[in-house]
Image (tube, grey):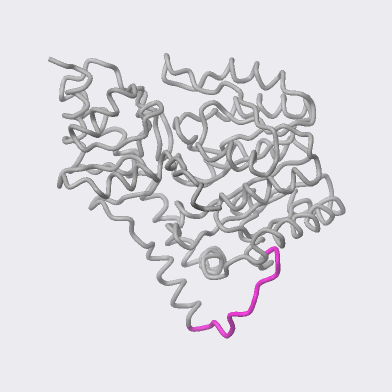
């Protein structure tokens, strides 16, 4: 059976990481994979995480299984962070949360749940989007369609085109939205635009599914939750897939969640019973350590304050790299206007570089970025490598 297999295509992002590792150039720069880097180019462990782990190790008494849906303490901590502790949704008992292996696990549980409860629904994803999105839903047996999102000519969200398109989505279908820091474009709706999206969602009776992987890395923890809060206040039902890889630095711990908001407590409880079945037949039981870290930090005021300060530092550094990158390109005499990079949010941006330019940057200058849209991870930049990146981009944009 296996001798008949041909090599499967490499993942467009993780495959880039493999090529980067094999590159012998000491001045190589990786702007592909979505991992935060500090000023020294390292991916650090948060100090709040280290302190939380010390507490956990001192107090831990068992390695027994968690409940299928994870611990109640973790669920409460996630709901408070994502929806806001003072939302009436929580006091009314309308939300339920299952602990998943990362944000990807949350999306897959959502996909399996949707296939179970509404198998004919289509999932509408933005064009462009994270490359793994369509694969997750199609593998679960759901039909996937796209709606326009980014205006590549203007280097910004094409909001009117997007809004007109989602107004045509059939009633009852699923609308996948990026909660903040849109991957791959970095362009997000404003709060006023989120309100317009919410109006369409309720009028069309669409089910919003929010991929919320970067809370805190755009403008701030609560600012980045504006779209989630607006949709939650307007829509009777929604799903939110959360990831704590980036904003807690827990990449290899695989910490995520799927939060479901229903019209009432009874519906939320019924939905949880089906979500638990999806979990049981998928990975059976969630991993404990990373969730214990998140719970300990969010339940300990001193650690939560430390963590919030660390997230704010990450957010400020990303914003600073955006500014320095735009300035570096201008200093190198790049004729194209890249000022839009400063107005985008989070770790990712579309540079607008074409595939040939991206290929040249990789092959001649060892600058690695995703081909589609010339997507870059801004958090992979440092003051030390921005001049190297800027010179290389100047060379491909302003050929002699």
The spot of residue 62 in percent (x, y) is 59, 83
Residue at the spot x=25%, y=50% of the render? 39
Q: Foreground residue, 114 or 77?
A: 114
348 part of magenta stretch = no
63 part of magenta stretch = yes
The spot of residue 378 in percent (x, y) is 34, 38
Is 347 on the left-hand or right-hand side of 86? left
Q: In which quadrant will I find the C terminus?
A: top left
Q: Which residues are magenta?
A: 58-69
Residue at the spot x=63%, y=19% of the render? 163
Is 285 on the left-hand or right-hand side of 90? left
The spot of residue 247 in percent (x, y) is 46, 52
Is 55 on the left-hand or right-hand side of 265? left
Image-quadrant location for residue 173: top right
| Image height of 374 relative to 76, above or below | above
Image-quadrant location for residue 348: top left
The spot of residue 137 in percent (x, y) is 64, 40
| Image height of 25 relative to 337, above or below | below
Q: Foreground residue, 109 or 300?
A: 109
The kind of secondary structure the magenta stretch mainly shows is loop
| Image height of 266 relative to 32, above or below | below
Residue at the spot x=41%, y=55% of the render? 309
Q: Residue furthest left?
A: 400
Image-quadrant location for residue 32: top left
């Amino acid at each position: 059976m296996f001798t008949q297999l041909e090599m499967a295509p490499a993942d467009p992002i993780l495959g880039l990481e493999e090529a980067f590792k094999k590159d012998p150039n000491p001045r190589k720069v990786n702007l592909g994979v979505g991992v935060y880097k500090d000023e020294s180019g390292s991916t650090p462990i948060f100090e709040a995480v280290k302190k939380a782990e010390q507490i956990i190790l001192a107090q831990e008494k068992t390695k027994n299984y968690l409940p299928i849906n994870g611990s109640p303490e973790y669920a409460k901590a996630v709901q408070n962070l994502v929806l806001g502790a003072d939302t009436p949704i929580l006091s009314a008992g309308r939300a339920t949360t299952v602990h998943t292996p990362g944000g990807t696990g949350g999306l897959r549980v959502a996909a399996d749940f949707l296939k179970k409860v509404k198998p004919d629904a289509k999932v509408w994803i933005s064009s462009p989007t994270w490359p793994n999105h369509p694969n997750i839903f199609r593998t679960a047996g759901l039909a996937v369609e796209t709606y326009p999102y980014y205006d590549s000519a203007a280097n910004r969200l094409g909001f009117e085109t997007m809004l007109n398109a989602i107004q045509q989505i059939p009633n009852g279908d699923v609308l996948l939205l990026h909660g903040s820091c849109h991957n791959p474009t970095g362009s997000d709706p404003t709060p006023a635009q989120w309100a317009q999206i919410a109006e369409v969602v309720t009028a069309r009776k669409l089910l919003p599914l929010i991929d919320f992987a970067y809370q805190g890395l755009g403008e701030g923890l609560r600012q980045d939750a504006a779209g989630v809060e607006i949709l939650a206040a307007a829509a009777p039902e929604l799903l939110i897939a959360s990831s704590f890889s980036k904003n807690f630095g827990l990449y290899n711990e695989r910490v995520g969640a799927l939060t479901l908001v229903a019209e009432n407590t009874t519906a939320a409880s019924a939905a949880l019973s089906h979500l638990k079945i999806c979990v049981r037949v998928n990975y059976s039981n969630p991993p404990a350590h990373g969730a214990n870290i998140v719970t300990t930090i969010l339940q300990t005021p001193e650690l939560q304050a430390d963590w919030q300060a660390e997230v704010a530092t990450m957010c400020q550094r990303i914003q600073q790299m955006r500014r320095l990158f735009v300035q570096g390109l201008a200093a190198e005499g790049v004729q194209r206007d890249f000022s839009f990079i400063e107005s985008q949010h989070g770790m990712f941006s579309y540079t607008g570089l074409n595939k040939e330019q991206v290929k040249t940057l990789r092959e001649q200058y060892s600058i690695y970025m995703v081909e589609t849209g010339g997507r870059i991870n801004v958090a992979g930049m440092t003051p030390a490598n921005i001049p190297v990146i800027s010179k290389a981009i100047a060379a491909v944009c302003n050929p002699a």
